[in-house]
Structures are given as C-alpha cells and as structure tokens.
Image: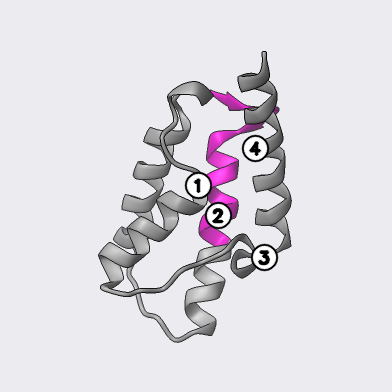
C-alpha cells in the first residue's frame, strides 16, 4: 500500500523514530510493545483511502500517547524532527490533492 510515493510503513517508521527520540530526551520510558501497538493503530488508519481517514497522524499519535502514558502531553510535528515534518507535509499535500479531485 502506498501513500503518495512512499510506503505507509516508511511513514510510520519516521514517526516512531521521532517519537522515540522525543520520549528519550524527555525521560519517558516505554517498552517495545508501546511502539508495536502504535504502529498497528497508525497502519490501520493510514491504510484507508484519504477520504475515509478520520484522524491525522499527529492526532492519532497524541490520542495514543495520552491514553497509554496517562499524560496530557501534546506533541507537534516539530517535536518529532525535520524528517517527520517534511513527510507529514507531503502526506497533507497528497491528501488535499486527493480531496480536491
């Protein structure tokens, strides 16, 4: 399954890597299953056609982090690094083009 010329898995990997760095820098401790479950949630949503996606990747991430870390943490694309920001922008442009057609 492709998301505007990049695979969904690559997009999710970029998000997870940014999240791992952020959580480590801010002294959060999570195990591998935390990321595995997040990956499943993201894949489920991002595999849908754009017009059926209910949440942005950042919304999915924040909902998941708040629920699973019992936190009010609100992450932004800037928290997850430049690679994630540029990937998210490409996703947003592709979604806008799709919805405009």
Q: Say which residue label 1 marks.
A: 57
Element type at mark 2: helix
Residue 47 visible in image: yes
Cα separation between marks 3 and 4: 16 Å
Cα separation between marks 4 and 1: 9 Å
Callout in the foreground (4, 2): 4
In reply to whether residue 14 is colored magenta, the answer given is yes
- Which numbered disc, 3 or 4, marks the residue that appears first in the sequence? 3
How many C-alpha atoms fall within 10 Å of the one at disc 2: few (<14), some, or many (≥20)? many
Element type at mark 1: helix
Q: Say which residue label 4 marks.
A: 91
- Which numbered disc, 4 or 1, marks the residue that appears first in the sequence? 1
Boundaries of the magenta span: 1-17
Q: Are marks 4 and 2 in contact (CB under 8 Å)?
A: no
33 relative to 94 in the view: left or right? left
Give whichever of 92, 22 is nearer the camera: 92
Q: Say which residue label 2 marks.
A: 15
């Amino acid at each position: 399954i492709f998301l505007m010329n990049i695979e969904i898995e690559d997009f999710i990997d970029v998000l997870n890597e940014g999240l791992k760095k952020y959580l480590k820098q801010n002294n959060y401790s999570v195990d591998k299953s935390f990321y595995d479950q997040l990956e499943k949630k993201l894949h489920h949503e991002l595999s849908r056609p754009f017009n059926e996606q209910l949440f942005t990747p950042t919304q999915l991430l924040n909902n998941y982090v708040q629920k699973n870390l019992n936190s009010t943490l609100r992450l932004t694309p800037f928290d997850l690094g430049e690679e994630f920001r540029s990937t998210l922008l490409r996703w947003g442009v592709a979604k806008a083009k799709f919805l405009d057609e």
